[in-house]
Image (tube, rainbow, N blue to C red):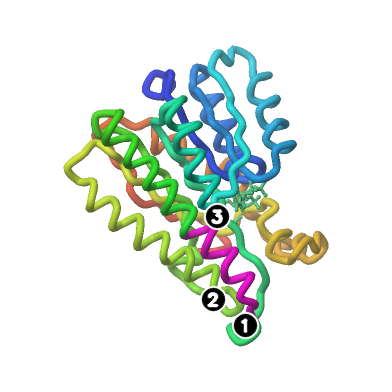
C-alpha cells in the first residue's frame, strides 16, 4: 500500500474535522511521502491537522492547506487553477458534507435546503468535474475519486428528507460517473458510512452538544478512523482493482 501511494497528490475536502481529518492522517501514516492538500472553511483547524501530520515520525511528504468552501463557485474556480493546476492531483476525497436540522418537510427553511444541496451535491459534483478534467488532460486518464455517501442515501429516515436525498443524489451521480469513465483508468469509489461519532451531530443540532451526545448514548458508533482505513485501502489497491461501493455500519445498525 505504501508503495502504491508513494508521492501521490491527495486532496481531502472537509479535512478540518471528523472523517476528512482522519483520512488525511491515515494516508500520511500509510505512505509517508504523500502530498496532501487539505481544504475546509476553518483554516485554524486545517493548520492543526497539518501540524499533526507533519509531526508524524518519518513523514517526508508535504501538506498544503487551502480555505475552500465547496459550495462557493468562485472559490472552486480559483481552486482549480491555483491549487490543482499548480500541485496536480491523483486522488480526490470528496468528504465535505453536512446535515442541518431535523425538521419535517413543511418546516425546513430554504436556507438549510440550499446549504445541504450546495455542499453535499453541487460541491461534490464540481470537485469531481475538476478532478476528471485534470485526470484526463494531465494524468493520462488515471486518478481516483472517493465520494462519501451515507447509509442515509439508501435508507431514508423521518426528519432527514433533505440530507437523505442529497446522499441519494451522491449515489446516482457516482454510479453514473463510474459508467462514464469505464474506458479510462479513473476509479470512482463510494463509501457509505452508517453512524460515525464526529462533529456531524453537533452540526445537525445547530451546535447543541448535549443533544449530539445523546445520539451516541448506549451504542457503539464507528470512529472516523474506521472510515479512513477503508478509504486508504480502496485507493491503495492495484490499479485495476476498483473497490467501487462500500456500505459500512456499526453492528447495532444492521
Ligand atoms: P464533521 O462535521 O465532523 O466534518 C465535516 C467536515 O466537512 C468538516 O471538516 C467541515 O469543515 C466540512 N465542511 C462542511 N461544509 C463545508 C463546506 N461548505 N465547504 C467545505 N468544507 C465543509 O462530519 P463527518 O466527518 O462525520 O462527515 C464527513 C462526511 O461523512 C460528510 O459528507 C457526511 O455526510 C458523511 N457521513 C457521516 C456520517 C456520520 O455518522 N458522521 C455517516 C455517513 C456519512 P469546515 O466546517 O471547517 O468547513
Q: Where does label 2 land, which residue?
A: 161
Q: Does the residue labelled 2 lie within 8 Å of ligand 1?
A: no
Evaluate if marks 3 and 1 touch, with contact meaning CB atoms under 8 Å apart: no
Q: Please give left or right for residue 203 compared with residue 95 in the image.
A: right
Identify the residue at horizontal 29%, vertical 53% (top origin).
Answer: 177
- Which is more N-terminal, label 2 or label 1? 1
Identify the residue at horizontal 42%, vertical 60% (top origin).
Answer: 170
> Within 10 angstroms of label 2, few (less than 14), some, or many (20 or more) residues?
some
Q: Where is residue 122 in the image (x, y as percent from the top left)?
A: 46, 58
Q: Where does label 3 land, which residue?
A: 71
Q: In which quarter of the image is residue 183?
A: top left
Rendered position, 140 above or below 181: above
Evaluate if marks 1 and 2 touch, with contact meaning CB atoms under 8 Å apart: yes
Rendered position, 170 above or below 187: below
Identify the residue at horizontal 55%, vertical 55% (top origin).
Answer: 71
* Residue 135 marker: none
Q: Where does label 1 land, which residue?
A: 104
Question: Is residue 111 shown in magenta?
Answer: yes
- Which is more N-terminal, label 1 or label 3? 3
Q: Quadrant of residue 219?
A: bottom right
Q: Nearer the viewer, residue 154 or 112?
A: 112
Q: Please give left or right for residue 150 compared with residue 113 in the image.
A: left
Q: Which of 100 and 114 is in front in this view?
A: 114
Evaluate if marks 3 and 2 touch, with contact meaning CB atoms under 8 Å apart: no
Q: How far apart are marks 1 and 2 (CA)?
A: 7 Å
Disc 2, SS: helix
Q: Where is residue 30 in the image (x, y as percent from the top left)?
A: 50, 24
Extent of the magenta region:
108-121
Amino acid at each position: 500500500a505504501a508503495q502504491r501511494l508513494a508521492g501521490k497528490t491527495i486532496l481531502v475536502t472537509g479535512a478540518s474535522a471528523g472523517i476528512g481529518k482522519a483520512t488525511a492522517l491515515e494516508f500520511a501514516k500509510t505512505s509517508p511521502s504523500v502530498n496532501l492538500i487539505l481544504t475546509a472553511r476553518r483554516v485554524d483547524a486545517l493548520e492543526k491537522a497539518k501540524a499533526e501530520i507533519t509531526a508524524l515520525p518519518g513523514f517526508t511528504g508535504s501538506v498544503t492547506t487551502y480555505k475552500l468552501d465547496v459550495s462557493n463557485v468562485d472559490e472552486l474556480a480559483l481552486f482549480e487553477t491555483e491549487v490543482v493546476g499548480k500541485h496536480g492531483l491523483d486522488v480526490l476525497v470528496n468528504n465535505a458534507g453536512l446535515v442541518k436540522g431535523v425538521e419535517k418537510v413543511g418546516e425546513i427553511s430554504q436556507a438549510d435546503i440550499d446549504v445541504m444541496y450546495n455542499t453535499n451535491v453541487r460541491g461534490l459534483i464540481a470537485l469531481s468535474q475538476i478532478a476528471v478534467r485534470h485526470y484526463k488532460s494531465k494524468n493520462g486518464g488515471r486518478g481516483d475519486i472517493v465520494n462519501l455517501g451515507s447509509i442515509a442515501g439508501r435508507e431514508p429516515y423521518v426528519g432527514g428528507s433533505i440530507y437523505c436525498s442529497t446522499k441519494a443524489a451522491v449515489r446516482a451521480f457516482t454510479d453514473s460517473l463510474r459508467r462514464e469513465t469505464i474506458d479510462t483508468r479513473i476509479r470512482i469509489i463510494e463509501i457509505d458510512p452508517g453512524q460515525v461519532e464526529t462533529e456531524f451531530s453537533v452540526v445537525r443540532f445547530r451546535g447543541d452538544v448535549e443533544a449530539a451526545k445523546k445520539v451516541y448514548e448506549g451504542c457503539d458508533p464507528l470512529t472516523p478512523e474506521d472510515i479512513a482505513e477503508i478509504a486508504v485501502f480502496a485507493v491503495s489497491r492495484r490499479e485495476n482493482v476498483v473497490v467501487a461501493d462500500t456500505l459500512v455500519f456499526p453492528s447495532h445498525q444492521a
